[in-house]
């Protein structure tokens, strides 16, 4: 059964990559031109993301290998990290393909309940790090553009930044509750009141209530009993977000010498926020590029530079998606 589902995930990934390449929203002559302009920096950026995925894998490993049960080899953790993100990138609703695959693969090591709780907790950690990053970017924007540069506080900008701050803090508070008490049972309880899915959710909750409570207890275990690994895992995820800003700093800085690393953090933060708002699109098609152009324009970077950088980042993403899909098969040989 597990091998069959593994093959299904692999074939789905291959098909999605083929469709993605055939429908790529850029002229291939333009792609060649962009790669030529990027020069040596394109393979450097691809390698940089290898480091970022390594940091993600270290964070994931801290959650999986909690000292109980069989230890999952780091090579397997790294493979699941890269392959899981590859499936997430090509899933039509976004961020939904990699998690079932990771759970399926981890079951043979740690069992179904622990695999489920570990994957859910890591996904929470990954999403939480985004909100921490976005919140710190708001603070950085205020410091750089209003405090340091002495700009007047525009009313609409104050309102927007204020709303973003309130939303981000509220979401982080919800995450803190989920870390302390678990949230799977509560999510299914909420779904049981939503039209179209309430009948299925209520039935699933009634049938698997004990199993879901066990998953919640394992999620809370890391936060309450293993606080040091918990905070290290979150710190690694947050640091990976910061390191990923080097990509924009290298590419835009090559075209615009005055572009600083702090600027790249703002571009990365607001472009990723914009693209995540349209999570239903595979690889955030369109929103990624649009978010880059808007974010770059917001800090006086020409929109064309943002679109150029987004295209290079998209090509890097395709490379790592292909690598991740290939690793789904090569990783099986090492189990």
Image (cartoon, grey):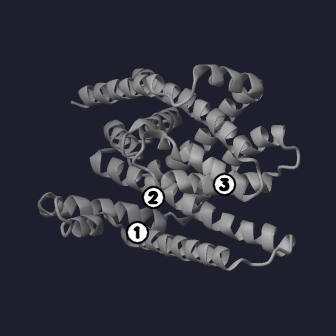
Measured as percent of width and height from the top left, residue 74 is found at: 52, 37
Q: Does label 2 or label 3 sit earlier along the sequence?
A: 2
Which type of secondary structure does the marked residue at label 3 adopt? helix
**Depth check: 107 or 154 in front?**
154
What residue is shown at x 43% (from left), y 67% (from top)? Answer: 179
In the picture, residue 110 is in which quadrant?
top left
Measured as percent of width and height from the top left, residue 142 is found at: 74, 71
| Mark 3: few/some/many CA within 10 Å (<14, 14-19, 20+) | many
**Depth check: 260 or 189 in front?**
260
What residue is shown at x 60% (from left), y 58% (from top)? Answer: 232
Q: Are marks 2 and 3 in contact (CB under 8 Å)?
A: no
Residue designated by label 3: 295
Which type of secondary structure does the marked residue at label 1 adopt? helix
Residue designated by label 1: 178
Rounded to the nearest angstrom, the CA distance separating label 2 from label 1 is 9 Å
Residue designated by label 2: 124
């Amino acid at each position: 059964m597990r091998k069959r589902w593994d093959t299904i995930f692999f074939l789905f990934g291959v098909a999605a990559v083929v469709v993605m390449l055939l429908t790529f929203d850029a002229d291939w002559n333009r792609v060649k031109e962009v790669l030529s302009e990027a020069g040596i920096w394109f393979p450097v950026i691809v390698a940089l993301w290898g480091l970022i995925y390594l940091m993600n894998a270290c964070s994931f490993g801290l959650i999986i290998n909690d000292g109980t049960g069989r230890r999952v080899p780091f090579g397997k953790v790294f493979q699941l990290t890269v392959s899981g993100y590859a499936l997430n990138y090509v899933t039509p609703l976004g961020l939904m393909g990699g998690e079932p695959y990771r759970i399926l693969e981890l079951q043979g090591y740690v069992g179904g309940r622990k695999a489920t709780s570990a994957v859910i907790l890591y996904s929470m950690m990954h999403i939480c790090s985004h909100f921490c990053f976005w919140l710190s970017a708001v603070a950085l924007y205020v410091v750089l553009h209003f405090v340091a540069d002495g700009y007047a506080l525009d009313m609409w900008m104050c309102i927007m930044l204020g709303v973003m701050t309130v939303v981000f803090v509220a979401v982080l508070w919800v995450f803190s509750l989920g870390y302390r008490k678990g949230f799977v049972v509560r999510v299914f309880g909420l779904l049981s009141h939503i039209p179209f899915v309430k009948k299925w959710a209520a039935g699933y909750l009634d049938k698997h209530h004990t199993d879901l409570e066990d998953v919640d207890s394992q999620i809370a275990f890391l936060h309450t009993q293993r606080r040091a690994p918990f905070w290290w895992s979150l710190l690694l995820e947050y640091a990976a977000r910061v390191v990923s800003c080097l990509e924009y700093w290298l590419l835009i800085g090559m075209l615009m010498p005055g572009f600083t690393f702090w600027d790249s953090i703002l571009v990365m933060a607001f472009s990723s926020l914009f693209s995540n708002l349209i999570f239903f699109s595979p690889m955030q098609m369109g929103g990624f590029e649009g978010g880059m152009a808007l974010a770059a324009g917001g800090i006086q970077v020409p929109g064309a530079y943002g679109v150029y950088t987004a295209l290079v980042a998209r090509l890097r993403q395709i490379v790592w998606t292909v690598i991740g899909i290939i690793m789904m098969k090569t990783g099986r040989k090492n189990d």
